[in-house]
Amino acid sequence: MEQKHQRGQWGSNLGFLMATVGAAVGLGNIWGFPYKMGTYGGFPFLIVYLALGVLVGFPIMLTELSIGRKVGHSVLVSYRTVGGPMGTLLGFLAMLSPFLILSFYSVLGAYCVEYMFLNGMELLGAGGLSRASGAETFAQILANQPMAIFFTLLFIALGFFIIRGGIKDGIEKFNKIGMPALAIALLIVIIRAVTLPGASEGLKFMFTPNWEPFTTLDGFLEVLSAAGGQMFFSLSLAMGITVTYGSYLSKKESLVKNSLIVILSDTTVAVMAGLAILPSAFALGGEGAELAGPKLLFITMQDVFNSMGAIGPAFGVLFFLFVTLAAITSAIALTEVLVTFILDHQTARGKTPNRGLVVGLVSLAVLAEAVLVAADGLGSNGLWIPFQETGRTLGASWLDFMDFISEGVAMPLGALLMSFMIWAIRPTLVRDEVRQCGQPFSNRLYRYYQFCIYVTCPIGMAFILYGQLRTFFAIS
Ligand code: PHE
């Protein structure tokens, strides 16, 4: 009990939800989901995505929350406690991913802050943004290494000040303001986007049912692995986040309800992000506009704001505020996985940890790797990159390399191991934790959970692993 007290807890279930949805809603929702939905079949993709959410996302999220809350420790100790040596391996994978993801997430977040700043300057009449194309602006930003490093430092420092405040007074407080602000900014951008002349093309791209990818087995498998990989990344699964945030959750709260709310909210924001982006990208982004990844945000969307006239920079500021909020609430969660690990480790060794110091040290370590990614400028500055000579995606930039190890290998492998671990420790552990304090978990739902853990999850996760490796080994 004493230990629990020192670790602190979320102030309320709403606070927990805001923070967990904040972790889930990130760049993946904004530049991954809408494009994949459009490319892989529109509405049918959404159905596949939701089905995977129910068959794989929900049981894994429930498992992570249960293990986190049951053990009440960092992800490594939580997995080790319930899963022995396999749990330890899983714990390490679940800490490696957040650390590596932070290397590029911080730089992408930094670009968002930089764009917000540039649009702000333009609004004040002090910038030359509108005279350059989005592509020119982005090329300059990538090439300007000192500036990129400065904004990366700023982004990490912002996170530092929030996380230093603790679970309740730092992370929860920020998310409780940040997430509603994100929703409002998003709604305003959507209203503008869908009322642009020509917007319907974008909506058609995203929503028109297209059965073509479903007509061959190969096509269908591709849809499955794309939707599965997207779902895992988007829900922040297998990265220690849900275990860590769950470890600060009160026994009184319903894990089933919370898992469902997080999944639904994350998917809703992903669809809404599509409504905010694709109509304008189609209406104003120009011929051959890029519709995915960093180029969608930093080139196409900037072109959209440039072509909106005097009001453009105001929407630019609002839009990049939305993206920055999405990025920082995710970066905070990634950092907290490592911070919680060190704090719990020190407490277990009888020390009284200093949160500020630990957050500072983790932030410095992240800064060190992020500087490399910032200096690399998505591979445009001539830095040496591992596997460069292979011509494959994983050697295209430091970002791709870090992404390969984390999202490509550690995350899906960890996810696959996780289902084997649950086989070994028996799903009853999860059932008993979910039923704490009389929370409902009917026998029928539990049987469904068992079915998912024994059947759908391992199959789904094998697909995800296959899909990720295929992406990274493709010739870029
Ligand atoms: N879920 C976030 C997104 O959709 C990314 C993320 C992954 C954040 C893992 C934290 C951990 O972009």
Image (cartoon, rainbow, N blue to C red):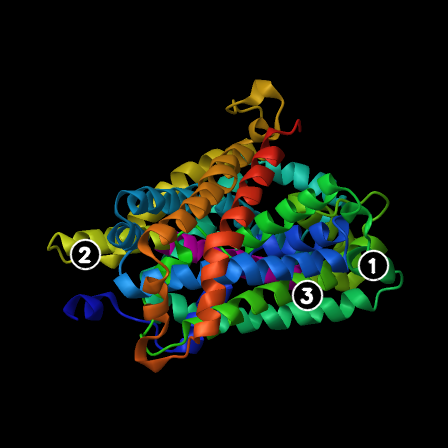
Residue at (67% x, 57% y) in the render: 48
* Residue 429: x %, y % from top left: 32, 63
Whether residue 14 is situated above or below residue 474 in the rendered picture: below
Magenta stretch bounds: 316-336
Which residue has dot 3 on it? 272
* Residue 463: x %, y % from top left: 57, 43
Residue 158 can be seen, yes or no: no
Mark 3: C-beta under 8 Å from nearest atom of ligand 1: no
Which residue has dot 1 on it? 208
Q: Is residue 269 left or right of residue 280?
A: left
Residue at (77% x, 44% y) in the render: 133
Q: What's the residue type where badge 3 is placed?
A: Met
By secondary structure, the bulk of the magenta-drawn segment is best described as: helix
Give the CA distance from mark 2 to mark 3: 41 Å
Q: What's the residue type where badge 2 is placed?
A: Pro
* Residue 143: x %, y % from top left: 60, 33
User: Please, which residue is most extreme toward the bottom here?
Assistant: 438
User: Please, which residue is most extreme toward the right here?
Assistant: 197
User: Please, which residue is most extreme toward the left here?
Assistant: 350
Helix or strand or loop: what does disc 3 sit on? helix
Residue density around tag 2, few if under 14, some if 14–19, many if 20 or more, within 10 Å? some
Going from the N terminus, do you reach mark 3 or mark 1 first?
1
Residue at (40% x, 47% y) in the render: 420
Q: Nearer the viewer, residue 107 or 62?
A: 62
Which residue has dot 2 on it? 353
Magenta run includes residue 370: no
Give the CA distance from mark 2 to mark 1: 54 Å
Residue at (65% x, 51% y) in the render: 31
Q: Quadrant of the C terminus?
A: top right
Mark 2: C-beta under 8 Å from nearest atom of ligand 1: no
Residue density around tag 1, few if under 14, some if 14–19, many if 20 or more, within 10 Å? some
Whether residue 88 is situated above or below residue 113 in the rendered picture: above
